Amino acid sequence: MGLFSFLTREIAVDLGTSNTLIIHNDKVVVEEPSIVALENSTGKILAVGKEAMMMHGKTHENIKTIRPLRDGVIADFQVAEAMIRAMIKMIDKKKPIFPPSLKMVICIPSGITEVEERAVRDSCEQAGAKDVRLIHEPMAAAIGIGIDVLEPTGNIVIDIGGGTSEIAVISMGGIVSNKSIRIAGDEFNNDIEEYMRKQHNILIGERTAEKIKNTVGAAMTELDNPPNDLEVHGRDMMTGIPREITVNYVEVAQALDKSISKIEAAVLNALELTPPELAADIYQTGIYMAGGGALLRGLDKRISIKTKLPVHLAEDPLRAIVRGTSIALKNFDKFPFLIK
């Protein structure tokens, strides 16, 4: 610890399509939806995170809500930079006299392009970071789960986030083979909205679809502990009048079946590309799952049935990635997989 170490702040960031998490001093200090509310006429930021999410879908013409990340990458550079800056400010309840310089490790999808990678780095630097390293999400997930990624042993990790699902085979501190598909939590929400429109003639918004997914969402039509049915409110497409319907987990499982089948196909594809020695290891270790999408009821069981391999769900799937990023931050110059 140097004399001026208090002027440097080390933070680990999981910049997700749906949620952004920040760890500082081994604590999750920020856990907010990745959304910003702007005033149309001036471009002024009105709210970030939970406050902005409460406005989502309920704004008038002078206010718009923007999700600056799409499919795991930055879609709106300026808004993303403002969101990162605002979330970093949330770490301090009291405003410091001297704003500290930031040392940051931030996780990115494994299928990201160099241009998209540069956008993430530039956004963080514009928000005040002096030293930025990047880590691929499946690698961060593996570290967060507790896998020794530097060992010469094959492990396969599935990270289902908001914008992308990442499947990666990891060995000796590197990604041997990976598959990244843009089917994840957001696509599940779209599937639910479409199902409600076609089956019940009712229009629902993104927030309602998210609520359905979290409350009665399922990957299988038969569950050991099924959730209770949910009353859903929306606009009738025939009459235009608001009405209520009851939704059960079987309907949601049917709505999500197509997207989950694509994730299953991606997992099988990643296994096909795995070298035989690592495949032998995976037969022993099984599959590890992390990310918010992994919380979908029955998804681990469904993938286990499809692959005929044991599936282990991370202890805290939503925070596993950011915890792994935090461990990587502590080993800033030791881990070979941190992208400079």
Image (spheres, grey):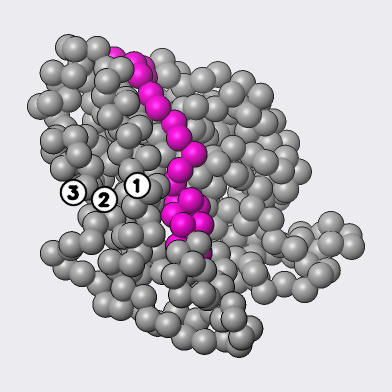
Mark 1 or 2: in front is: 1
Instruction: Name the quadrant containing residue 78.
Output: top right
How many marks are shown on the rendered structure?
3
Residue at the spot of label 2 = 299
**Real-space Cα separation, disc 3 to disc 2, in angstroms:** 5 Å
Instruction: Name the quadrant containing residue 284.
Output: top left
Tag of residue 260: 1
Residue at the spot of label 3 = 301
Tag of residue 74: none
| Pointer 1 with pointer 2, Cβ within 8 A | yes
61 on left or right of 82: right
Q: Earlier in the sequence, mark 1 or mark 2?
A: 1
Residue 121 in sight:
no
Disc 3 secondary structure class: helix
Q: Position of residue 156 (x, y in %)?
A: 26, 28
309 on left or right of 192: left
Q: Looking at the image, which residue is at 22% across and 20% down? A: 154
| Pointer 3 with pointer 2, Cβ within 8 A | yes
Q: Looking at the image, which residue is at 25% across and 72% down? A: 227
Residue type, numbered disc 1: Ile
Q: For residue 191: magenta?
A: yes
Q: Looking at the image, which residue is at 46% across and 27% down? A: 110
In the displayed orientation, state which residue is furthest to the left: 284
Disc 2 secondary structure class: helix
38 on left or right of 327: right
Crowdedness near tag 3: few (<14), some (14–19) or many (≥20) residues, C-alpha within 10 Å? some
Q: For residue 181: magenta?
A: yes
